[in-house]
Amino acid sequence: MASNEQIHTAVITMIDRAGSMVDTKESDIMAKASAPTEPGASSNKETSITLNGSMLTIPHGTYSTLTTAPATQAETAITAIKNFILQSGLQVGDALPTESQLCTDLGVSRSSVREAVRTLVALDIVEVRHGHGMFVGKISMRPMVESLLFRGLLNPGDDHRGLRDIVEVRITLDNALAESVTQAWKNRQDTELDAFVNELEELAARGEPFTDADRSFHMRLLEPLENHLFLHLTEAFWAVHTLTVPLLGAPKPEDMLTTARAHRAMLQAARAGDVQAYREATTQHYAPLLATLT
C-alpha cells in the first residue's frame, strides 16, 4: 500500500500539472495498468475498469480513504475512481469511463456511482461535460477556498475572526518561507516584480485599491520555489482575502502606503538574501490589516 507521503506527492503533482491537456495514449495506459504485481498478490486486490473498449487492471490500495468506518458503495466508487486516475497516469482533461462502465466494473449501483461523481465534482477532481462524458477535473484549491470563506462568515459575534485566522496563517507561511524566498531571489532581477511594486506604490499614493497587483506580487515571489504547493496554498488564501477584505470598509490612506512600501522592502530584502530583513518587511506588510482586525 502506498504511504501517505507517496499519495500526497502524487496529488501535488496532479495540481502542478493543472491547466495542461495531455493526450494519454491507450498503449501507455495499458502498459501502466498491466504492470506485474508482487509475487503472491491475490486477484481480489485488483479492479478492472473499461476505458474506450480497453480493459485496465487497477491494483487496490493506491489511495486510502480518510475514514476507518465500513465503506459504502459510494465511498468504494470514490476510492476506485481516484485509484484509476492515479494508476492510469491521467492528466487534467483526460476522459474517464462512462457511468454505465463504472457501474459494471465496480459492481455497484448507478445511484452509488452518481453520488460518487457528485462528490468528486464538488472536490474538483472530476468534471462532467454534459453530452460528452466525465473527465479529470482541474484539482484546484476551489473547494478549500469556499470552505474557508464560509467558515469565516459563520462566526457570530466576531465578524473578523475568520479573516484574522487566515491572515495569521499567511504570516506564519510567509515567515516560514523567508529563507527559501531569499535564497531563490538573491541577486536576481525581475522586471515583472519591479513593475508590480511600482504599481502598488502608485495606486496607494492615489488612494486606489491594489488587490490585483498585491496578489500578483506574492504569486510571482513564490514561483521559483520547488514546492508549488506553497504557491497554491497562498493563492487559495488570497482568494478568501479578496472576498472578505471589502467587508472591512475602505482602508486608511496611510495604511495603504505602509502596505505598498512594505512590498518594496520585502523585494529588496529577498534580493539581498537577508532573511531577517525579509521577515521584518513581512511584519510591516500585515501590520495595518492586523490592526484593523483586532
Image (spheres, helix red, strand yellow):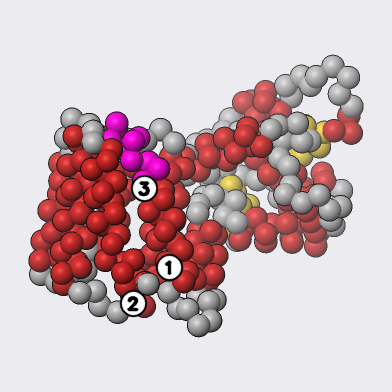
**CA gap, disc 2 and disc 1:** 10 Å
Disc 2 target residue: 248
**CA gap, disc 3 and disc 2:** 23 Å
Disc 1 target residue: 163
Q: Nearer the viewer, residue 55 or 59?
A: 59
Residue 181 forms part of the magenta stretch: yes
Disc 3 target residue: 174
Q: Position of residue 269 (x, y in %)?
A: 20, 40
Q: Residues within 10 Å of mark 3 (few under 14, many from 20)?
A: many
200 lies above or below 181: below
**Amino acid at pointer 2:** Leu
Question: Is residue 54 at least partly visible in the picture?
Answer: no
Q: Which residues are magenta?
A: 174-184
Question: Is residue 242 at least partly visible in the picture?
Answer: yes
Q: Earlier in the sequence, mark 2 or mark 1?
A: 1
**Amino acid at pointer 1:** Leu
**CB atoms of marks 2 and 1 within 8 Å:** yes
**Amino acid at pointer 3:** Asp
Q: Residues within 10 Å of mark 1 (few under 14, many from 20)?
A: many
Q: What SS does tag 3 mark?
A: helix
Q: Earlier in the sequence, mark 3 or mark 2?
A: 3
Rendered residue at 81%/49% (across/down):
68
